[in-house]
Amino acid sequence: MGPARRRHHADGDLAPRRGARHAVLLGVLLSAGCGAIYQLESDYLFPTADVRAESAAPPEGVEEEWLDVEGGRVLAWYLPPTRRSPGPAPAVVFAHGNRERIEDWPERLAPYREMGLAVLLPEYRGYGRATGTPSEAAIEGDFAHFVDRLGDRPEIDAQRIVFHGRSLGGGVVGVLSTRRRCAALVLESTFTNVPDLASQWMAPMGAIRDRFDTRDALVHSYTPTLIFHGVRDTLIPFRHAVELDRTAWDSRLVAFDAGHDDLPRGRAYWDAIRALLETTGVLGEATTEGGLEAPEGSLGRLN
């Protein structure tokens, strides 16, 4: 048996119209066979035509890594911490939403670097300058490879690597946490799994191939988990966050008065992340007493 479950409750890309339309079409295409369903599923989860980059050289100070894969090449950006401390540094691996690219995130994730963490931004196949065909299996394999590379860096402490994912990216890092150890997990505007998400528009179906089963991953993980979600999110409803919080062994749910793409990344957001990093020992010394307090600016505690 695993350790007794601890919980801390605090209240603190996928385009809706197109998503609903695709989900309805998935039901209509049941009679057309799995091939048609898988193609539509892929178009819904991975709209690569919307996220290709003509040219996006890395910003100054960013190290670019490449990985040869079947049918193409994928890349990751490595951003060193801006606040230096003695010894190897902690790091965060970030997975973006399905209508985003790694180019969208260096500035938004700057507070991580200011806290002393390096940031790794792996790209999905078919996104930006990466080539190949995206799928759950492909993305998880690519991320695992980049995490291994990160842990091999002499300037990085492999025992203090955090996974953070937004929307689809939460599913990516949730599943990744069952394949590679992480010190803490941050899930932002994330679903329980793809079939559950699709069921809000149609009857549940078993033909979905790329499931990104975040809930199942949390069942098998004892990783301290921070969950952000907007209570007005109509794309991935708030109930998904509640279910993830109920499933996780050691979790904290921070809710904001926001939708899916407007979650405020202000003081309350970063205070919650810093508290997680300090509690888990990613920053400073680990502590297990008292849990995490509700961040100022969130909606308060959930009962």
Image: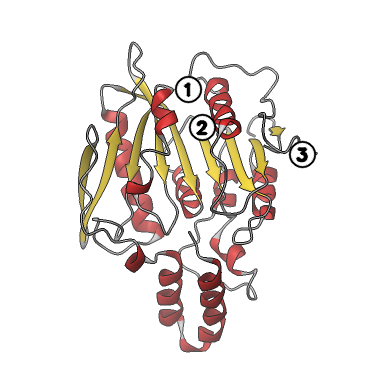
Mark 1 Cα-neighbour bin, 10 Å: few <14, some 14–19, many ≥20: many
Give how far across and how far down residue 8 sits, in percent: 70, 32
Choose mark 1 or mark 3, whichever is in front.
3
Kindly identify the residue that appears in the image at 30 percent across and 64 percent down. 133
| Residue 75 falls left or right of residue 176 | left
For label 3, the SS is: loop
Give how far across and how far down residue 172 sits, in percent: 45, 50
The residue at which mark 1 appears reads as 282
Of residue 69 and residue 290, the one placed in the foreground of this image is: 290
Between the C-alphas of marks 3 and 2, the distance is 21 Å
Q: Earlier in the sequence, mark 1 or mark 3?
A: 1
The kind of residue on which mark 3 rests is: Leu
Between the C-alphas of marks 1 and 3, the distance is 26 Å
Which quadrant holds the C terminus? top right
The kind of residue on which mark 2 rests is: Ala
Choose mark 3 or mark 2, whichever is in front.
3
The residue at which mark 3 appears reads as 302
For label 1, the SS is: loop
Q: Earlier in the sequence, mark 2 or mark 1?
A: 2
Of residue 174 and residue 97, the one placed in the foreground of this image is: 97
| Residue 228 falls left or right of residue 185 | right
Give how far across and how far down residue 100 sits, in percent: 40, 55
Q: Which mark is residue 102?
A: none
The kind of residue on which mark 1 rests is: Val
Q: Which mark is residue 184?
A: 2
Total marks shown come to 3
For label 2, the SS is: strand
Q: Are marks 2 and 1 in contact (CB under 8 Å)?
A: yes
Between the C-alphas of marks 2 and 1, the distance is 8 Å
Q: Earlier in the sequence, mark 3 or mark 2?
A: 2
